[in-house]
Amino acid sequence: MIKPKFDEVIHAPTRLSIVSLLAATEWADFGFIRDSIGLSDSALSKQLTILDEAGYIEIRKGFVSKRPRTSARLNSVGRAAFEQHVRALQEIVARAGASVLPPPDSSAKR
Amino acid sequence: MSGELRPEEAAQALAEIEQRKEQVLRLVTIPRWFFWAIAGLNVGLSAAIESRRPIVVGIGITLFVVGLVAVILRFVLGSVRHAQPRSDLMPPSGVFAILGFVGLVLAVTLPAAFLLQANGVRYPATLGALIGGVVMVVGGPLLTRYLQRAMRANASGGRR
C-alpha cells in the first residue's frame, strides 16, 4: 500500500516531466530527456542536479565511441517518492469527485 | 503546497505523467526492417543450403551469421541509444506473445517445407522459409502493436 505524500521537489513542472520519464525507464540518456522535454543542456543539468541532491536519481557518466555520454536513472528512494506523489495527486483529484483515471484511449491519441 | 493545489492542477499533473510514460512506451518498437531482414536472411540461408554446392553453402552460412549479428546489433544499439524502458512494464502476456509469434513462424515454415518436399517441389526449404518470411513481415508489426498495448495496459494497471 503506497502512502500518499505530496513532494515539492518532484512537483515543480519541469522536474515532474523528468521524473515521469525516468519512472518509466531503467535509465534514460541525457539527450533523450532534453529532447523529450524541450530543455536546454544547462536547464536540464540544473534540474538533474536538484534531483540528485535530493537523493532521487543516479547520474552515470561514461563514453560511447569516445564521445561523452550522460544518463540518469531514478533510484529506489526517488521511485518511492514519485509513487507517493502520484498517489497524493490522485487523492486530490478523487476528493474533488472526479475520476483519476485517464480516458481509456487518451494515451493512444497523444 | 499540496493543500493549495487545486484538483484541476493535480489532474493536469497526472496527465503530464501519463504523457511522459507514453513517450517511453513509444520507444518499445520493433522496426519493420528488422522483420524484413530476418526473413531475407532465412530465405538466403535456405537457398544456399539447397543449392548443395559447398562454396555457395559456405558463403551463405557466413553471410547469414554476419547479417544476423549486424541486424541484431543495429536493432539493440538503436533501441538502447535513448533510454531503456523498465523491464517490468512488459507483462507475461507480452512474453508469451513473442514466444507465440516465433512458434507461429516455425509452425508455418516447417510444415510448408515438408509438404512441398513430399510433393516433389524443388527448393522446398527455400519456399518454406519464404512463406515463413511472409508471416514474419505481416505479423511482426502486429506483434509490435500488441506489445505496446500490453505494456500500456500493464503500466496503467500498476499505478491504479
Image (spheres, coloured by chain):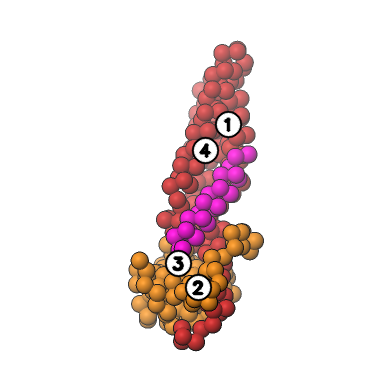
Callout 3 amino acid? Ala
Mark 2 Cα shell of 10 Å, populated few (<14), some (14-19), many (≥20):
some
- Give the CA distance from mark 1 to mark 4: 11 Å
Residue A10: quadrant of the picture: bottom left
Residue under label 2, please give it: A94
- What chain does badge 3 belong to? A
Chain coloured orange in this rendering: A
Mark 3 Cα shell of 10 Å, populated few (<14), some (14-19), many (≥20):
many
Q: Residue at x 48, y 47 (%)?
A: B94
Secondary structure of the residue carrying numbered label 3: helix
- What chain does badge 2 belong to? A
Residue under label 4, please give it: B101
The tag on residue B132 is: 1
Q: Residue at x 52, y 38 (%)?
A: B101
- What chain does badge 1 belong to? B
- Give the CA distance from mark 2 to mark 1: 51 Å
Going from the N terminus, do you reach mark 1 or mark 4 first? 4
Residue under disc 1 on the same chain as residue under disc 3: no
Chain coloured red in this rendering: B
Secondary structure of the residue carrying numbered label 2: helix
